[in-house]
């Protein structure tokens, strides 16, 4: 059984309060929040004031995925806005170890995300310092894209790496996750599934969450 993290990016922004109520009442574990800067990724999403407002609607953990350059400039503000897990991109951080230390010193769990082309082996020397790896199974920037099948191979590699060191690091899969691939991802060793369109655009989002949850 994996943790399920619905991605707010696919929600109806005109009905955010109702979407949050659905999330809160559902079996979902974390809320996945995609922050984009229009520089690291070719899209702009939402930021601090939105997260701060949403914080009042649920006590479940906020899993904030920063697709931004220079995340160190904003880590403290994301903590204040209510982030519990803060994930930065390996490709955006020349001083990744410093970013991870900063996030942890602020009292958040630290995550590192890697793009589809980035080898799992590049995580070798940061693995023991972090709480979560976010494997991008689409190119970051947009919801609703097709799952890249090669991700399954990366999940298996990462599972082996983590287990061989006796570590407890979550493997989160982000992009194009739904009924078609969730079981395979869990079998390969994933522990957290992000689901945007497959939850918020489903006829019955709560049922979609329960389905993923019972796999
Ligand atoms: C993509 C984001 C994902 C996205 C997933 O850049 O990081 O979290 O919201 O959406 P779906 O599940 O619709 O692919
Ligand atoms: Zn994301």
Image: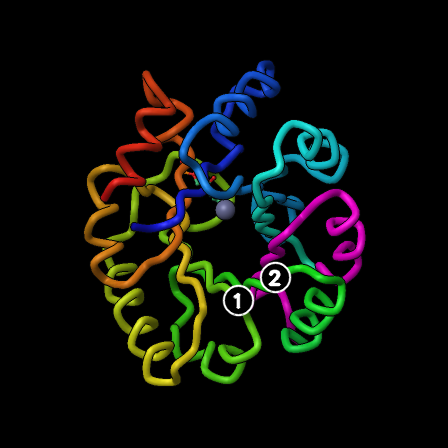
Ligand 1 resides in the quarter of the picture at: top left
* Marks 1 and 2 close (CB-CB < 8 Å): yes
Which stretch appears magenta?
70-94
Q: Write down the quadrant of residue 112 in the picture.
A: bottom right
Q: Where is residue 210 drawn, in percent x and y?
A: 31, 32
Q: Where is residue 184 drawn, in percent x and y?
A: 19, 53
> Residue, x 37% and y 77% (percent of image)?
162
Q: Mark 1 points at which residue?
A: 131
Q: Write down the quadrant of residue 153 in the picture.
A: bottom left
> Residue, x 60% and y 44% (percent of image)?
62
Query: Which mark sits nearer the N-terminus, 1 or 2?
Result: 2
Q: Mark 2 points at which residue?
A: 109
Looking at the rendered structure, the secondary structure element under dot 2 is strand
Eyeballing the image, is 173 above or below 48? below
Q: In which quarter of the image is the C terminus?
A: top left
Within 10 Å of disc 1 (Cα), the crowding (few <14, some 14-19, many 20+) is many
Q: Write down the quadrant of residue 75 in the picture.
A: bottom right
> Residue, x 39% and y 73% (percent of image)?
120
């Amino acid at each position: 059984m994996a943790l399920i993290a619905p991605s707010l990016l696919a929600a109806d922004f005109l009905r955010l309060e109702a979407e949050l109520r659905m999330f809160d009442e559902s079996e979902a574990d974390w809320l996945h929040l995609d922050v984009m800067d229009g520089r690291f990724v070719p899209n702009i999403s939402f930021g601090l004031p939105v997260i701060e407002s949403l914080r009042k609607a649920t006590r479940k953990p906020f899993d904030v995925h920063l697709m931004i350059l220079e995340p160190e400039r904003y880590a403290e503000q994301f903590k204040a806005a209510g982030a519990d897990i803060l994930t930065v991109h390996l490709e955006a951080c020349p001083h990744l170890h410093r970013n991870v230390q900063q996030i942890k010193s602020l009292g958040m769990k630290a995550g590192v995300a890697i793009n589809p082309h980035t080898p799992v082996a590049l995580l070798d020397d940061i693995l023991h310092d972090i709480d979560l790896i976010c494997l991008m199974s689409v190119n970051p920037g947009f919801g609703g894209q097709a799952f890249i099948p090669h991700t399954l191979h990366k999940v298996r590699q990462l599972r082996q790496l983590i287990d061989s060191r006796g570590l407890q690091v979550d493997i989160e899969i982000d992009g194009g996750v739904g009924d078609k691939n969730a079981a395979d991802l869990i079998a390969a060793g994933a522990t957290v599934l992000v689901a945007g369109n497959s939850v918020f655009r489903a006829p019955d989002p709560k049922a979609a969450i329960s389905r993923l949850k019972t796999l």
